Every structure is written in structure tokens, then in C-alpha cells.
Image (spheres, rainbow, N blue to C red):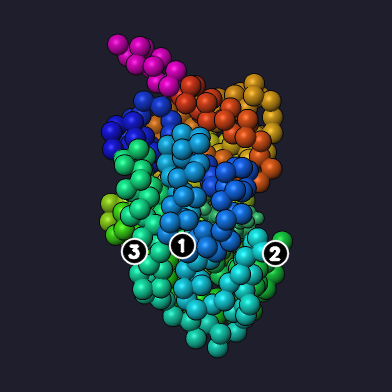
């Protein structure tokens, strides 16, 4: 990869960059007509579990939008299927038999990642070959609590009340479930690293449901185990949580290289909470893409100014919505590239 293609990795490591890198959570999704066309040829599970189809889906947004990172097309529930649990998508994940009791948890064990998900390793190798060093490839997994929330609830929920009742009613059962999920995630991410991903992101979408005390007791220890194991292999680890402003100080103790934050707090405030030991990713409100091009430009400028010049990866504060207008997406990417390279140039001139 040339220097410019390293922008994302340099920003993760808080090294100086010529401009701020940008990618989009859920960048391969229904807002892209080309993705919708691919979905007419393949079911969602085929896209995840067929290496050729996953490769096409991964490369689509990078080619169409000229993004600074590719993210493996898959789903956080793919390793849950590999554990032998029956998961369907409609379009969100549905478990045929949810995990509810200590006996259900005792039956689970971490699978051999390569044996159960060979298509993931195959897709990563094929994507790397097709990218030819154009930009880095991000691998990912769901964090244990977010996976547990789906596994216990059986699908999407507004409150995830079954998972939270388990936490208070049978804490040892939740701990045992988080433990087996953490080992599954470590194996899954190590397999992705061996196959060639340049960075990984842990999606803890539902961590924000936990109090800070519950996060520190149940989730932080397993997230730290995953993050430190992978980061010690020289691969940046991005930790994302949604609705989790109250957890930022704890997340900064996880060993993650980058914290990916939602839009609720501006990044200068986030920085004052987490200190200088991590890079930040984010945090434009996904609905800001519905604004006028001029308003999008101003919103991007505000994010860039509050983030500061180093240690920032531009992204949305959560996955892009299926209704996001493509013109807004293009305006955002253009603004990040133009404004951040102007800032870098001005700084250089000032210094010389
Ligand atoms: O970022 C990318 O482009 C890579 C692909 C990716 C998908 N899911 C594809 C997908 C990634 C990184 C994920 C992660 C994921 N999956 C998360 C964490 C991130 C987040 O958004 O909070 C979660 C919670 C899931 C579980 C999941 N999978 C849900 C809730 C849904 C339905 C949501 C929806 O868009 O309707 C899915 C299905 C899913 N995963 C789709 C895609 C593109 C839509 C399926 C379709 O094509 O119909």
C-alpha cells in the first residue's frame, strides 16, 4: 500500500496524515442501488456465506464511493450460526431457538473458526487480491454483550428485556454466556487476521443499555480480553458502541486502539473524557445525510474541527440507513476529503 492508501491505518495509530480517512459503517447496504441488485441475485445469507458474493458486496461501496477502507461483508451473527445455533434473517437476525437457561448456555462451545467459516478466510484473501493495496480491509465481530442480547432475546428488540433480566436474575448464566461468546469472537478475529485483514472492529451496538457498573462488571473484562489479544498481534482494534456516552471512560480502558462513537457527544467532549491514549472514529449523525449539500459540508467541517487533525477516522455515528440519499453520501465524502486536506495544507504552510 502507498502512503495515501495507509491513511486509515495511520489515523488509527495517531500518526500524521495528509487528510482524514473516511469510510461508512454498513457501507455495503440497501442505500446503494448496486447492493440492491446484488441482493436480487443472492439471499442475505448467501452474501455472507459465499466467498465470491461476499467479495462483490465488500468491493461495491469502495469502488462506487472511493472510500479509504473496505469492510468485510458479513454479519455479527455469522459466528453464532457457526456455534450451531439456527439464525435466520428477516432482515434482522432471528433465532429459531433462543438461549434462555443455564442448561442452554452449558450446551454451547466455541467453534473452530476456520473449519466452520472457511468462506470468511476465502473472502478475505480474494478481497485483498482484488483490492491490490488500494486501501486496507477491516474485519469485524460483534462484542459479547451485543451477541448475547440477540441470542437471549431471539431477535431484535427495543428493550432487550430478557437479556437484561438475565443479567440481574441469573448473573452467573450471563457471565458464562459472555465467556463462550468472547472465546468464539477471539477465534473468529484471529482467523480473520491470519487470512489478512489490516484492522478489526468490534461492534457493541447494545452496550449502551448497560449501566456503567454493569458494563465494567460484565462486558469490559471480555471486551478487554478480545481487544488486547488482537491488538498484541499488531492489528488496530476499533471498538464501537451506540448510545454509550456514559461508558466512554470505561471503554478507554479496554485496550482498543480506536473508539468509534455515536453522534450524541461532539468529539472534543469525547476527547476530554477518554484522554489521548486512543484514536477516535465518527461521528456524523446518520440523518445529517438528509440535509442540503451546504449543510452537510458545514456539519462535516464541525466534526473535523472538533476531532482535531491527528487520530481521527471520519465515519457516521451508526450504520448508514437504507433511506440515506446517495447525493448526501457523496457530499459528505467530498467534504471530508476537501476540508481535511485544506486544513493539512494550511498547517504545513504555517509551519514552514
Ligand atoms: O459495514 C458493512 O458494510 C459490513 C457489513 C455488515 C452488516 N452487518 C451487513 C448487513 C456489518 C458490519 C454488520 C454488523 C451488524 N449486524 C451489527 C452491528 C452494527 C450496527 O448496525 O449496529 C448488527 C447489530 C447486526 C445485526 C443485524 N444484521 C441487523 C439488526 C440487521 C437488520 C438491519 C437492517 O438493515 O434492516 C442485519 C441484516 C444486515 N446486515 C443487512 C446488511 C447489509 C441488511 C440485510 C439485507 O440486505 O436485507
Q: Residue at x 47, y 76 (%)?
A: 83
Asked if the residue at tag 1 contacts the one at tag 3, i.e. Cβ–Cβ closer than 8 Å, the answer is no
Q: Is residue 345 magenta?
A: yes
Res. 191 mark:
3
Separation of marks 3 and 1 at Cα, in angstroms: 17 Å
Q: Residues within 10 Å of mark 3 (few under 14, many from 20)?
A: many
* Residue 208, image x, y percentages: 60, 56
Q: Residues within 10 Å of mark 2 (few under 14, many from 20)?
A: few
Residue identified by numbered label 2: 157
Can you tell which of label 3 and label 1 is closer to the viewer? 1
- Residue 299 position (above or below residue 203): above
Q: Residue furthest front?
A: 41
User: If the image is split into quadrants, where does the C terminus sit?
Assistant: top left
Residue identified by numbered label 1: 50
Going from N to C along the chain, the mark reached first, 1 or 2, is 1
Quick one: 160 or 114, which is closer to the camera? 114
Q: Which residues are magenta?
A: 341-352
Going from N to C along the chain, the mark reached first, 3 or 1, is 1
Separation of marks 3 and 2 at Cα, in angstroms: 30 Å
Can you tell which of label 1 and label 2 is closer to the viewer? 1
Using the rendered view, name the quadrant where residue 122 is placed: bottom left
Separation of marks 1 and 2 at Cα, in angstroms: 28 Å
- The reply to whether residue 208 is in sight is no
- Prevalent SS, magenta region: helix
- Give the secondary structure at mark 3: helix
Left or right for 206, reference 350: right
Using the rendered view, name the quadrant where residue 162 is placed: bottom right
Amino acid at each position: 500500500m502507498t502512503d495515501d492508501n495507509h491513511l486509515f491505518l495511520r489515523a488509527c495509530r495517531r500518526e500524521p496524515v495528509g487528510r482524514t480517512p473516511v469510510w461508512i459503517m454498513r457501507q455495503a447496504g440497501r442505500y446503494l442501488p448496486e447492493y440492491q441488485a446484488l441482493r436480487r441475485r443472492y439471499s442475505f445469507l448467501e452474501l455472507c456465506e459465499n466467498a465470491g458474493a461476499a467479495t462483490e458486496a465488500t468491493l461495491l461501496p469502495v469502488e462506487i464511493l472511493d472510500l479509504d477502507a473496505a469492510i468485510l461483508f458479513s454479519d455479527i451473527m455469522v459466528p453464532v450460526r457457526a456455534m450451531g445455533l439456527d439464525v435466520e434473517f428477516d432482515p434482522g437476525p432471528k433465532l429459531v431457538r433462543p438461549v434462555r437457561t443455564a442448561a442452554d448456555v452449558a450446551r454451547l462451545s466455541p467453534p473452530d473458526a476456520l473449519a466452520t467459516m472457511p468462506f470468511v478466510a476465502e473472502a478475505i484473501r480474494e478481497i485483498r487480491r482484488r483490492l491490490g493495496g488500494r486501501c486496507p480491509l477491516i474485519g469485524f465481530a460483534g462484542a459479547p454483550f451485543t451477541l448475547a442480547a440477540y441470542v437471549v432475546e431471539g431477535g431484535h428488540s427495543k428493550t432487550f428485556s430478557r437479556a437484561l433480566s438475565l443479567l440481574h436474575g441469573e448473573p452467573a448464566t450471563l457471565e458464562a454466556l459472555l465467556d463462550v461468546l468472547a472465546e468464539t469472537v477471539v477465534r473468529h478475529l484471529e482467523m480473520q487476521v491470519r487470512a489478512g485483514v489490516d484492522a478489526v472492529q468490534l461492534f457493541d451496538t447494545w452496550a449502551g443499555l448497560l449501566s456503567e457498573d454493569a458494563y465494567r462488571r460484565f462486558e469490559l473484562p471480555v471486551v478487554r480480553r478480545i481487544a488486547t489479544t488482537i491488538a498484541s498481534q499488531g492489528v488496530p482494534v476499533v471498538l464501537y458502541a451506540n448510545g454509550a456516552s456514559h461508558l466512554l471512560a470505561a471503554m478507554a480502558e479496554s485496550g482498543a486502539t480506536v473508539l468509534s462513537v455515536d453522534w450524541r457527544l461532539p468529539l472534543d467532549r469525547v476527547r476530554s473524557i477518554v484522554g489521548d491514549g486512543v484514536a477516535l472514529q465518527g461521528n456524523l449523525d446518520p440523518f445529517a445525510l438528509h440535509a442540503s449539500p451546504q449543510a452537510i459540508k458545514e456539519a462535516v467541517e464541525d466534526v473535523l474541527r472538533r476531532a482535531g487533525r491527528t487520530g481521527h477516522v471520519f465515519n457516521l455515528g451508526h450504520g448508514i440507513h437504507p433511506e440515506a440519499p446517495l447525493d448526501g453520501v457523496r457530499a459528505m465524502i467530498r467534504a471530508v476529503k476537501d476540508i481535511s486536506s485544506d486544513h493539512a495544507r494550511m498547517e504545513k504552510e504555517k509551519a514552514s
